Amino acid sequence: MYIISGPSAHLIAVSFCVYIVVNIFENLIHYNIGKFSDKITHFDMPTQKDWIKIIIVMCVFALLQGVLTFWFQKKQKLI
C-alpha cells in the first residue's frame, strides 16, 4: 500500500497548505523580531534571498507535518 494515494494524499495536501498559510505570518513576525531584536518599530519584508530560505524551510516542515498528521491519524484508527 502506498502512503500517497487517494485520501492520504488529500490529507497531506490540505495539512501542507494550512501549515504554509498560517506559518507565513508567524515567520514574518519572527523575521522582524530577529532583525530588530526587542524593538519592532516598523515591519520590513524579507529580501528575495531571505524569502527563498523561508519558503524552503517552510515546505520541508509543511511536508513533514502532512506526513506525520497522516501517520498519527492512521495509528489512531488502529487503536
Image: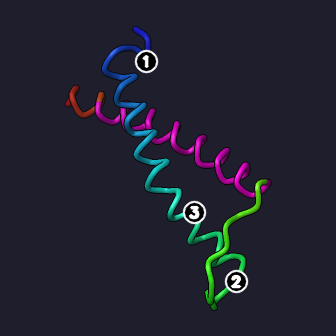
Q: Residue at x 30, y 28 (%)?
A: 74
Q: Quadrant of residue 31?
A: bottom right
Which residue reaches farthest top?
A: 1
Residue 49, given in percent of the width and then of the height, sits at 79, 54
Question: Which mark sits nearer the N-terminus, 2 or 1?
Answer: 1
Residue 35, given in percent of the width and then of the height, sits at 72, 77
Which residue is the site of mark 3?
Answer: 27
Q: Are marks 3 and 2 in contact (CB under 8 Å)?
A: no
Q: Nearer the viewer, residue 77 or 79?
A: 77
Identify residue type, mark 2.
Phe
Question: Which mark sits nearer the N-terminus, 1 or 3?
Answer: 1
Q: Secondary structure at mark 3?
A: helix
On screen, residue 44 above or below 60: below
Answer whether residue 59 is magenta in the image.
yes
Which residue is the site of mark 1?
Answer: 3
Could you tell me how far apart the alpha carbons at marks 1 and 3 are, in whole angstroms? 29 Å
Check the picture and name the quadrant holding the C terminus: top left
Residue 21, given in percent of the width and then of the height, sits at 46, 51
Q: Which residues are magenta?
A: 49-73
